[in-house]
Amino acid sequence: MRRIISVLLENQPGALSRVVGLFSQRGYNIETLTVAPTEDKTLSRLTITVNADEYVLEQIEKQLHKLIDVLKVSNITESAHVERELALIKVKAQGENREEVKRLADIFRGQIVDVTQKLYTVQLIGTSDKLDACIAALADFTKVVEISRSGVVGLARGEKAMKA
Amino acid sequence: MEKLSGASMVVRSLIDEGVKHIFGYPGGSVLDIYDALHEKSNIEHILVRHEQAAVHMADGYARATGEVGVVLVTSGPGATNTITGIATAYMDSIPLVVISGQVPSSLIGNDAFQECDMIGISRPVVKHSFLVTDPRDIPAILKKAFYIASSGRPGPVVIDIPKDCMNPAVLYDYQYPEDISMRSYNPTTSGHKGQIRRGLQALLNAKKPVLYVGGGAVISGCDAQILALSEKLQIPVVSTLMGLGAFPGTHKNSVGMLGMHGCYEANMTMHNSDLIFGIGVRFDDRTTNNVEKYCPNAKILHIDIDPSSISKTIRVDIPIVGSAEKILDDMLAQIEANDYTINDPAANDQWWSDIATWRAVDSLKYSTNDKKIKPQQVIEAVHKLTNGDAYVASDVGQHQMFAALYYPFNKPRRWINSGGLGTMGFGLPAALGVKLAMPEETVICVTGDGSIQMNIQELSTALQYDIPVIIINLNNHFLGMVKQWQDMIYAGRHSQSYMDSVPDFAKISEAYGHIGMTISNPAELEEGLQKALSMKDRLVFMDIHVDETEHVHPMQIRGGAMNEMWLSKTEKS
């Protein structure tokens, strides 16, 4: 099952490599990983998506907690949450395809953020599923030249918050 | 405030931390620390012959005393040579602080001479590591390193210090912190009250309970509590390789070591138990055999200070996270206050009579003859002549299992071996570390002709610092454990396990300035051992030629349950 794990991490040199190393060392597969500083400059926030059953997830959470630089670990998929991913999708947009790409981007509430005579770059925000669907729809009728995806970020809904 | 250079701060911090011994090897990047060390004489530095041995020595020192072992090495090869030692300590949860020099900050990443990314290369085998970026942080980093290494589940901590951070010409205010607090590191020590109550009730209600003690029990220092619990409720105790000595091996409630080479009664007790109470164990694969077939009727109660050890390989019914000593104290206080006894004494009697029938199998029996010395015989003789009270450091292989099975330890911290990583070459340096910590005690290194050659150069260190240990080399001219597996699984094809150019160890020992003895006649064994043990102030290397056909038994059958064992070369349980 797909899970989203949020981690608050001391913003120390090498801290990120400890987290990444842990996953490869113990054979857990990272699907996406995002990391950036938080409002507190001494802390970074990581969002990791993994495919894991209940049992592996429990070990991942415990092993993450064991890292000295890790402050908090939370599985945000265990309750209501918001998750988003951003994709930049560069596609061939010539002839009648040009209009069709624009239409499809609109349907998925994407924006065209870069234009050349031959290409459009579509910016799209949503859940990973929505991004997958849009990319598949584009690939149906035009050539997808290049894609860059941000990986998932997420927060628990409601009052719940992860703080140091 | 006192002004010190980065290098002097390292040395002063170690002094302020109460460190008495450092094990190390100098080199370009740490010369400033070595210079500062030269001025201060209250720390004894042991110059090893290979950095790996420095870590094993500090490790042996730490295992025997419970204190943090300290290592100092240079950058590059000095640092990489420590990795096997650090991994050994990590697997067995041994507290170490390893200080490595690093090339100057300005050269990091340039592939400079003797540069190696120590933080990166050690990352999977350390509890934590620090790269110093500002010399002013040195005292606080050392304080944190000692705290992290020794608290919670102990482990090795690396501090990598670039050379420019140690410049003797630049002075900073020095003050060693009195205490330290880290928002991201607060190990749990007191167990959950409700869980402790539930655990105790399960124990009282059990008909076939067993205490299964491991290295965590030794580290926690809860041997008195385990003894009290076992005696109060009449519960049998089995021990892992790492837990030997946490419960007296000669006590009537001791059922021996369990696992791959555990004795029959210990594995049978586990397999037939209805409640396994794991204390500081991690259900390692060498102690469970096939997890699918593991102890089918047992509920599992497990104390560990590391939450990630709980339900890692075997699902636990009642987990209690915390210090084993504190949790057992709580349980004993409840037993005392409520005058609890085991709820079904008749079942307990039956349980002990089951155990008696398993003991009667006498799975450690072996035969002797007047032609060849049996390795088991050597260990039993050593046990007799040292009254079971020596510190025994072992290498890895058949001799390690013979020592574990035939030398019952009655006290914790006397059995020093690389259980988790299984590091050949550990024994001699570890024994030297133990002897430095315990100069009045008898320290034995049990080794084999394979293992001893992995760190034999430390005989030179032993001479320099006058460290009189006794080396018992069970020499069979084979890599014995490899040979045993090849005999059992590979139809006796001894691929690369035979050593046909084993040196004359007695002469080697003499060349290093020690005493060497060679014994191959069973009739001379005891007398020879006696003689060696009487030479208190000399290192004696006893090269004992033993029967090369001997196997370690019992041995669990691969893929089987706990109760499936080879009891001899031909006989299954």
Image (cartoon, helix red, strand yellow):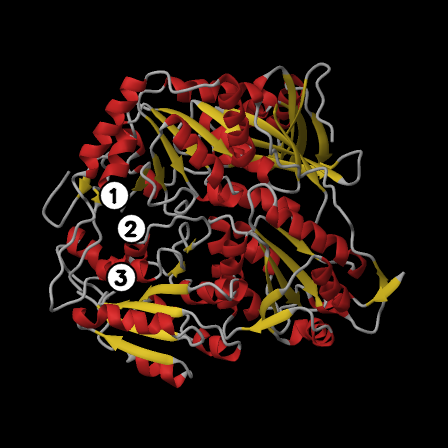
Asked if marks 3 and 2 touch (Cβ < 8 Å), the reply is no
User: Disc 2 marks which residue?
Assistant: B405
Residue drawn at 46 percent across, 63 percent down = B441
Residue drawn at 17 percent across, 51 percent down = B489
Answer few, some or many: residues within 10 Å of disc 3's Cα (few below 14, many 20 plus, some between 14 and 19).
some
Give the total number of marks visible in the rendering: 3
Q: Nearer the viewer, residue B244 or B302?
A: B244
Task: Mark 1 vs mark 3: tell me if same chain.
Answer: yes
Single out the mark in the foreground, 3 or 2: 3
User: Disc 1 marks which residue?
Assistant: B263
Q: Nearer the viewer, residue B168 or B463?
A: B463
Asked if marks 1 and 3 touch (Cβ < 8 Å), the reply is no
Of helix, strand and loop, which one carries label 3?
helix
Left or right: B389 with respect to B183? left
| Res B60 seen here | yes
Q: Quadrant of residue B169?
A: bottom right
Identity of the amino acid at label 3? Ala
Query: How many angstroms separate mark 3 from mark 2 (CA)?
Result: 13 Å
Q: Nearer the viewer, residue B419 or B178?
A: B178
Of helix, strand and loop, which one carries label 1?
loop
Residue B191: percent from the left, percent from the top?
57, 28
Answer few, some or many: residues within 10 Å of disc 1's Cα (few below 14, many 20 plus, some between 14 and 19).
many
Q: Is residue A67 above or below residue B111?
A: above
Q: Chain of mark 1?
A: B
Q: Chain of mark 2?
A: B
